[in-house]
Image (cartoon, rainbow, N blue to C red):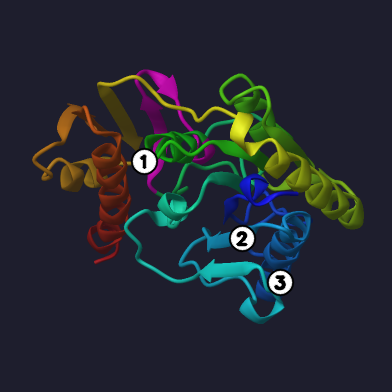
Amino acid sequence: MTVKDLVKVLISIDYEGATGVVHWQEPVDIQKRAMTEDAIALARGLSEHSVIITDAHAAGRNLFPEQLPQNCELIRGGPRPLGMMEGVDLADCVILAGYHAGIGSPKGLMDHTFSSSTVYRMTLNSRKMNEALINAYLAGYFKRPVIMATGDDVLVESLKDELDPGVEYVITKYGISRFAARLRPAQEVRTELTERARAAAAKATKIRPLIPEPPYNLRIAFHDTVVADLVELLPEGKRISGREIEFEDQDFLKIYRLLRLSLGLGITARYYREK
């Protein structure tokens, strides 16, 4: 491998699509170990490359830093300007690891889109979105391709018609219901993670980024009206119905930031429900 073949890879790693887990109430050490061991398996396939791993689940404090290989930097904690995709501007390409089905997906394990307590439905330019697609579009904003995605079978199927045909995939488990899945053997999955990551990096320069055409119309239906009441306070927010807000702009990064602000206001809404 020559110097020109080397790439810097961002691994944005989430929890719900990680190997071996089926619920948010799994013991914390099992959650952290699942994410960490998947990250290690991916990094093993990228041993000749530089890697940035972004801990993209919840508050971003899930991975065991001391267990990661020497070729890896870790982005940990929050808040961050680019959220789950922090570091994408520093990388050449992206792996979406441990991602999951979007909210409302039949047999989608732990299905949600950014927040199971806030978001009921999300569309971009009238197309139903999940976290992986939104984040792939953000990568495309920076002209970075997604070269690999891993997670449950429903997630993988949702991406195959959207991303470049050269993208590598690993199915970690098969959804049965929201909190049940048929799990593949962990060692088998992690061996495949290593192999597919190596293959993806080798062809990274040939994979096209996902770049949507402006203008961008992001429409979010929230679980209840109190979130919409708060999000409507943003000058860019337009109330469409009792619980729906839309944003329109030519700049996708601005749309992404408005999405993140909306999710933050979803957390604020809990104050009004609980007091």
Q: At 71% from the left edge and 71% from the top edge, which residue is drawn?
A: 69
- The answer to whether residue 37 is above or below residue 211 is below
Q: What kind of residue is marked 2?
A: Ser
Between residues 151 and 262, which one lies in front from this camera angle? 151
- Evaluate whether residue 47 shows in this view: yes
Magenta highlight range? 118-132
The Cα atoms of the two marked residues, 2 and 1, are separated by 41 Å
Quadrant that contains the C terminus:
bottom left
Q: Are marks 2 and 3 in contact (CB under 8 Å)?
A: no
Q: What kind of residue is marked 3?
A: Pro
- The answer to whether residue 228 is above or below residue 31 is above
Q: Mark number for residue 189?
A: none
Label 2 sits on residue:
50
Between residues 267 and 29, which one lies in front from this camera angle? 29
Label 3 sits on residue:
69
- Evaluate whether residue 152 shows in this view: no
Which numbered disc, 2 or 1, marks the residue that appears first in the sequence?
2
The Cα atoms of the two marked residues, 2 and 3, are separated by 11 Å
How far across and down, in percent of the image, does residue 119 sit?
39, 41
Query: Within the image, what quadrant is residue 50 found in?
Result: bottom right
Which numbered disc, 2 or 3, marks the residue that appears first in the sequence?
2
Helix, strand, or loop for circle 3? loop
Are there few (<14), some (14-19), or many (20+) residues within 10 Å of tag 1? Answer: some
Label 1 sits on residue:
223
How far across and down, in percent of the image, does residue 110 sit?
62, 46
Q: At 43% from the left edge and 20% from the top edge, which residue is drawn?
A: 127
Q: At 29% from the left edge and 64% from the top edge, which residue is drawn?
A: 274
Between residues 207 and 130, which one lies in front from this camera angle? 207
Which numbered disc, 1 or 3, marks the residue that appears first in the sequence?
3
